[in-house]
Image (spheres, helix red, strand yellow):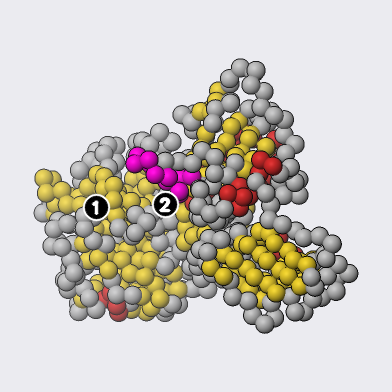
Amino acid sequence: MNKVVLLATAVAFYGVSETFAQTNLKTIGTPINTKEYREHAFSISGDGKTFIYVQDRPDGTKVFMSTRQDKASSWESPQIISTITDKIQKGKIMGTSLTYDGRELFFDAILPSGFGDRDIFYAKRLGNNWSDPLNVGEPLNTAMFEGNPSISQDGKMLFFVRENFEKYHGTESCKTIWVANRTDEGGWTNFEKMGEPINSECEKSATLMPDSRTLIFSSIRGGGAGGYDLYQTELQEDGTWTFPRDLDFLNTPSNEEYAAISGNSEEIYIEVKGDIFVAPLPNKFRGSRQVPVNVMVIDAMTKKPIDASVFVAMNSRNSASFSAKNGVSLMQLKAGNNYTLACEAPGYLPANQIKVSLENANGTETVTNTIEMMPKNISYNIKVLDADNNSISNAKIRIFDLSNSQIVPIDIHSNARLVFGNMYGLTVSGGGAEYVGNWIPETSDATDNFIKTVKLDTKAIVATPVAATKTKVDKTENPYVTAPAIDMSKPVETFKLKSDPSITYETKKVYTLNDIYFDRSSVIVKSEYYIDINRLIELMTLNPKLNVQLAGYSDSFGDANINQRISLRRAKSCADYLKRAGINMNRMLVQGLGEREIILDEKGKEDTSKSRRVRFIVY
């Protein structure tokens, strides 16, 4: 009797109709399932193109990977992952978990590098191969049993089970479900044993669905069909989990110990009698409706993909980060919401945020966004003209980097490599005329093919700007001057954020913009602060009659005149961010206050990093 007949017979015996088994539960088929061996401990990538599973053979446990071109294609011939299979000493792998992007594989095993009993390991994908397994380390792994890992789609949260020696199911000790968070350094922290209503002190596995809020787990508890059954619970906004409901369309008097969910949450994979089967997941068990989002990150100059970090925010409280390896970042975002995406990559300027609206997305098609990032270091050509716009070929050019007090090299063709957003001192002389001033290369220069044109006029000499207190504001340098002045006679009003009512703002009160600090001589707002500025955007959006005054500051290092201009550009950078988010520029008043109100540390010395800041007042 073959496995399919056994399945139908077993399902009928357990009281579930054969019709369901024949029409809804379907074998994954060959070449993955075999007649001779048990296939189990499976996981699938978010795009549905990579399938990992374990096969038990008389000569030991084998770990396989199968791939396919797309979801409509058949699975290709599986390949043994030798880097993992060859390391297994004894026992079986109980669970595997692929990250959503398919680049990391978490699994449990007993390996030489373990801490005692079963431990959790991970490997990184290298093309069609995998790295040697690495122990996730202490304190997640202990001398006890840690197994059945399930990683969240962003790779930042790991669910697993630990031994519970006080309770047994037959001769086997039960397990309890735990969760840990990944640190920026790659370690694990915030270990927490999940309480009621999830743990009943006899659980077997946990599988986090792609929405990162819905958990399917295996448990022995009252009201089940018998043995281990599969249950589902959802994380609520207040941090609690809903009372688990059993997956009644799958549970039988036998043991249902493990499940995997497809990236679109439409299918569930389970093991039945040593083979892998797949069934459609009923709507009521699909959790939050998710939309697959594909973010492509490319170099704005070469159009080639680059490695980057992608920051995703729904509001000031709900945010996440994903890695874009080789320019591609795959994720699932909740349908019906609007999101803000931002990027950061070494050697590149933070990309302008982009808006992604999923209000009308149906979840059946992937939403693709391309983000271009401008390299920080760009080659500029300095073009010198006389009063009649004739080129001066023998002009003397000197560029001084104000961030490190170094002369910038210039080749024989008047080209120099400069960093966007940094301020430079520029001196040009020729034909009896001279230009002396400060220059901040910006992305707008790209429209001029990165050419800095300096026009020398023998009738006038352009001098370094004087102190801010003696200089009239130039609207070409600061267009944010049309907002009304603060009316100090008005009563103070208090406003709350809709996304987080615990955050309040008062009119006419000075706030530092969420500790947004700048590198020395830089006016670039780092993308790590974007989420914080979004709070101000939310406040201004919800209250369209509010205005804001943004004031930039500098430290006292270097020339005071230069520092004043840098401080103005810092405030303007924040205003530009608000403008891109839809805040009318006539509601913003921008000032550069230079070295005023420097910040001192507890020893009375200037804390230069905190002096370089932007503060704001809403009114």
Q: Secondary structure at mark 2?
A: loop
Seen as rendered, the residue at the extreme bottom is: 412
Relative to 254, 328 lies left or right = right
The answer to whether residue 53 is seen in the rendering is no
User: Residue placed at 69% from the left, 62% from the top?
Assistant: 436
Sort mark 1 into few (<14), some (14-19) or many (20+) by Cα contacts within 10 Å: many
Q: Residue at x 86, y 67 (%)?
A: 387
What amino acid is found at the position of numbered circle 1 in the picture?
A: Val
| x and y, in percent, of residue 566 in the image | 60, 51
Residue 529 position within the rendered picture, expressed as x and y whole percent measured from the top left = 51, 48
> Which kind of residue does numbered mark 2 sit on?
Met
199 part of magenta stretch: no
Residue at the (22%, 75%) spot, across then down: 87
Residue, x 63% and y 74% (percent of image)?
A: 416
**Distance from Cα at disc 2 to Cα at disc 1:** 17 Å
Q: Which residues are magenta?
A: 601-611
Nearest the viewer among 150 and 25 is 150
x, y (%) of residue 137? Answer: 23, 61
Marker disc for residue 556: none
Residue 161 numbered mark, or none: 1
Instruction: Give the main secondary structure, helix, strand or loop, of the magenta stretch.
Output: loop
Q: Secondary structure at mark 1?
A: strand
- Camera-side residue of 459 and 342: 459
Residue 495: x, y in percent?
56, 26
Q: Is residue 106 visible?
A: yes
Label 2, on which residue?
209
